[in-house]
Amino acid sequence: RPVTYEGPNGIRALLAGIEAETGWHPFYDGDNPIGLRNFEVAGGISLEPGGQFELSGSPQADLHGTAAELAEHLRVAKKAAAPLDIHFLGLGVTPLWRVDQIPSMPKSRYGIMKPYMERVGTLGTSMMFRSATVQANLDFSSEADMVKKLRVSVALQPVATALFANSPFADGRDTGYLSYRSHIWLNTDEARTGMLPFAFEE
């Protein structure tokens, strides 16, 4: 079942276990730790609305460094999670549970986001509570370099979606999509999702 925040086997306890393993420093929303920061190099862990862990990796020169950092993150997370009987799913969408079955994390901004997402699209709360991903963040050296990278990345988005599609299930059934996560994002908020035709304008 989805993991609650509080309780002896909750996400708060999991964060404490990772803190003990890494020496990273907690940050808070009120009295609740909602993530960990590594002060030595950029990076840390933050909580997404449904308890998803978001690793913000440190800058890396290549994919090999990123892969090693992710592998170490998973090693530490699984070690801290094992005594709590918490397990991880490496999927784009939670395959079983409805949005209303997933406990919300105690992060005040999500109390603002949820009503907004319910107004602007049909699946915005699914994006918040049921989806997860690995994101690549690319730096740029100039405005022209940024434009080139934006155009290439937007053009390649459908290819990347197809290559890494791993979310065919939701609500315990086959959705008919190979990437239900992509379907969710196309029905989240038209003002900030979908393709960007202006990116290809002169």
Image (cartoon, helix red, strand yellow):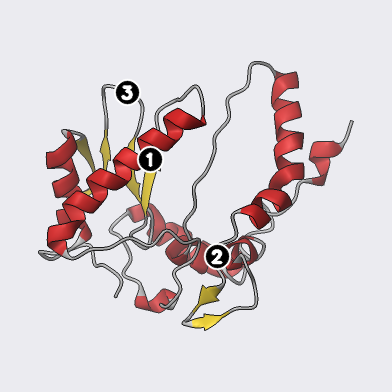
148 with respect to 100 (left or right): right
Task: Give the residue at x 44% y 25%.
Answer: 59
Label 2 secondary element: helix
* The furthest residue to the bottom: 173
Asked if residue 192 shows in the view, the reply is: no
- Position in image of residue 119 (x %, y %): 58, 68
Q: Quadrant of the C terminus?
A: top right
Q: Nearer the viewer, mark 2 or mark 3?
A: 3
- Label whose residue precedes the other's in the sequence (3 or 1): 3
Dot 3 surroundings within 10 Å: few (below 14), some, or many (20 or more)? Answer: few
Give the number of the mark in front: 3 or 1: 1
Above or below for 145 versus 154: above
- Mark yes or no: residue 176 visible: yes
> Looking at the picture, which amino acid does disc 2 mark?
Gly
The vertical placement of 23 against 102, above or below, is: above
Q: Which residue is mark 1?
A: 70
User: Which of pointers 2 and 3 lies earlier in the amino acid sequence?
Assistant: 3
Callout 3 amino acid: Val
What residue appears at the point 72 percent right and 52 percent down from the top-left corner?
158
Point out which mark residue 124 bears.
2
Where is mark 3, residue-wise? Answer: 41
Q: Looking at numbered disc 1 in the image, what kind of residue is underneath it?
A: Leu
Quadrant showing the N terminus: bottom left
Q: Residue 73 location in percent, x, y? A: 31, 42
The numbered mark at residue 189 is none
- Foreground: 103 or 61? 61
